[in-house]
Image: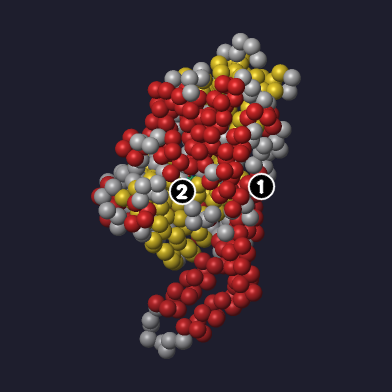
């Protein structure tokens, strides 16, 4: 294509987009990033924990430079009913080893830092403009259309996040159905640093990642989350759209009830809500991934559905960063070779196959199906856990039954075959 306005256009200044733009600019290519928000991060949402390994590959100095909130040194998982909560708390010095750490982040700070890195490398950013469609020529992508403007490029990188209409147009991908997409809702609640450390029992600067299952989504498919930031707590929940739509409780009410749960209310007591956000989350894993390239176009991050929710961990940002890095590098190499056809860009997929992105998504490809179908995980198993724990810990003067007898009575309510079957299916999916 002769006389393009830019070598590359990146749509979206999230994790994938800014890293892709950084790689392209670093390679000396002219690159324009178009972001619909008024600043990087203005429209973005995460729960908030970033596994730092992928960022370290792009910016080795990220540990001292990036606006991380707290290093995560406690992992907590809770099974919750309306009147109980059983929590596993895990801490390990291994979480502090370079390359293995994770940090809580706030996108309003993190995304501008990432975009700044790309800008410093030479990328141009325009904000407040949504890309409405792609310019096509002889079946290949040749640029973007935003408002009255048509801007051309040798290659376009779609990093526009979940629910991308542009991905659909670029590779003819059918959008996922409501059972494969969840809705996420979150509040950031301001609290003094010392109060947060006292409440989650963490050292200064450290914090917790806490995932909940059960009553937080009123027994529907999904879960709650809590991440500690420097001077705030991110609290929210994720629930599958088709399941929430079929249930009686809207997500905003679920969040209010979650905040008032006896195990959560003391953590956020006295805090002030300073941010409220909602976003979609792709939950279908590898099965919903579109083709990753076509003539003149590459797709990275959540616009390619690169997200993994395993119940005990949520990942998307490290996938987006690594995919952005490889998409940017592949595009730069293709530009240098003067060929941005689908064949030339296919090495992007190969690079992702060889690193953790596609390996991990493939490894857990059966999990979304398991989670969707094992509804007992969200209602009957938290109740079972409560019954077992009540039996163990409550002493009221009446003769105590043997633990075995109490356990069997609680398990009977769920059904031993259901329990064993679900455990086996869960093991296979993980
Ligand atoms: C509730 C919730 C909890 C999560 N928890 C975690 C977690 O703890 N850890 C983790 O790793 N991941 C988590 N994720 C997933 C993670 O946030 C995403 O995977 C990640 O942000 C994807 O990055 P991205 O760059 O692909 O997309 P995004 O960060 O969504 O960026 C896309 C960008 O494109 C812009 N854009 C969209 N359309 C257009 C357009 N037409 N024109 C111009 N610009 C456009 C958007 O404004 C946005 O800036 C969570 C997600 C949610 C919703």
Q: Which of the marked residues, 2 or 1, is nearer the chain's N terminus?
A: 2
Question: Most extreme residue toward the front, as rendered?
Answer: 337
**Residue indicated by mark 1:** 287
Q: Nearer the viewer, residue 94 or 128?
A: 94
Q: Which mark is residue 13?
A: none
Dividing the image into 4 quarters, which one contains the N terminus?
Answer: top right
> In the image, 281: left or right of 396?
right
| Ligand 1 lies under 8 Å from the Cβ of mark 2 | yes
In percent of width and height, residue 22 lies at 46, 27
Q: Residues within 10 Å of mark 1 (few under 14, many from 20)?
A: some
> In the image, 101: left or right of 158?
left
In percent of width and height, residue 93 lies at 33, 57
Q: Nearer the viewer, residue 278 or 293?
A: 293
- Residue 14 seen from this side: no
Quarter of the rendering containing residue 290: top right
> In the image, 156: left or right of 197?
right
Q: Nearer the viewer, residue 362 or 397?
A: 362
Residue ID at (55%, 80%): 409
Q: Residues within 10 Å of mark 2 (few under 14, many from 20)?
A: many
In percent of width and height, residue 179 lies at 65, 49
Of helix, strand and loop, which one carries label 1?
A: helix
> In the image, 265: left or right of 284?
left
**Residue indicated by mark 2:** 236
> In the picture shown, does residue 190 fall above or below 13?
below
């Amino acid at each position: 294509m002769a006389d393009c306005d830019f070598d590359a256009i990146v749509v979206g200044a999230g994790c994938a987009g800014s890293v892709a733009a950084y790689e392209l600019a670093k390679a000396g290519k002219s690159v324009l990033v178009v972001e619909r928000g008024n600043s990087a991060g203005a429209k973005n949402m995460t729960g908030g924990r970033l596994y730092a390994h992928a960022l370290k590959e792009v910016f080795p100095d990220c540990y001292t430079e990036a606006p991380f909130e707290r290093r995560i040194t406690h992992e907590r998982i809770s099974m919750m009913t309306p009147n109980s909560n059983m929590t596993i708390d895990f801490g390990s010095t291994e979480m502090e080893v370079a390359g293995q750490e994770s940090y809580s982040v706030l996108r309003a700070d993190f995304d501008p830092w990432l975009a700044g890195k790309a800008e410093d490398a030479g990328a141009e950013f325009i904000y407040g403009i949504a890309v409405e469609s792609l310019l096509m020529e002889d079946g290949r992508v040749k640029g973007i259309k935003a408002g009255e403007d048509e801007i051309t490029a040798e290659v376009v990188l779609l990093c526009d996040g979940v629910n991308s209409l542009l991905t659909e147009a670029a590779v003819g991908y059918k959008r996922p159905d409501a059972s494969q997409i969840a809705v996420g809702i979150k509040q950031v609640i301001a609290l003094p640093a010392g109060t947060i450390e006292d409440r989650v029992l963490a050292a200064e600067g450290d914090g917790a990642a806490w995932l909940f299952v059960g009553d937080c989504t009123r027994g529907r498919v999904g879960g709650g989350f809590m991440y500690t930031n420097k001077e705030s707590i991110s609290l929210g929940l994720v629930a599958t759209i088709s399941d929430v739509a079929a249930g009686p409780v809207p997500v905003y009410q679920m969040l209010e009830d979650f905040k008032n749960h006896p195990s959560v209310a003391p953590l956020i007591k006295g805090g002030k809500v300073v941010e409220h956000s909602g976003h979609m989350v792709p939950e279908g894993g590898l099965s919903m991934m579109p083709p990753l390239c076509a003539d003149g176009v590459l797709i990275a991050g959540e616009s390619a559905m690169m997200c993994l929710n395993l119940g005990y961990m949520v990942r998307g940002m490290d996938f987006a960063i690594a995919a952005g890095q490889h998409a940017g590098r592949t595009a730069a190499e293709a530009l240098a070779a003067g060929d941005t056809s689908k064949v030339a860009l296919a090495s992007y997929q190969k690079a992702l196959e060889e690193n953790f992105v596609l390996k991990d998504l493939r490894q857990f490809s059966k999990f979304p199906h398991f989670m969707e179908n094992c509804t007992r995980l969200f209602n009957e198993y938290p109740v079972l856990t409560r019954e077992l724990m009540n039996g163990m810990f409550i002493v009221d003067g009446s003769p105590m039954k043997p633990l075995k007898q109490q356990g069997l009575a609680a398990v009977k309510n769920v059904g031993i075959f259901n329990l064993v079957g679900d455990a086996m299916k869960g093991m296979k999916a993980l």
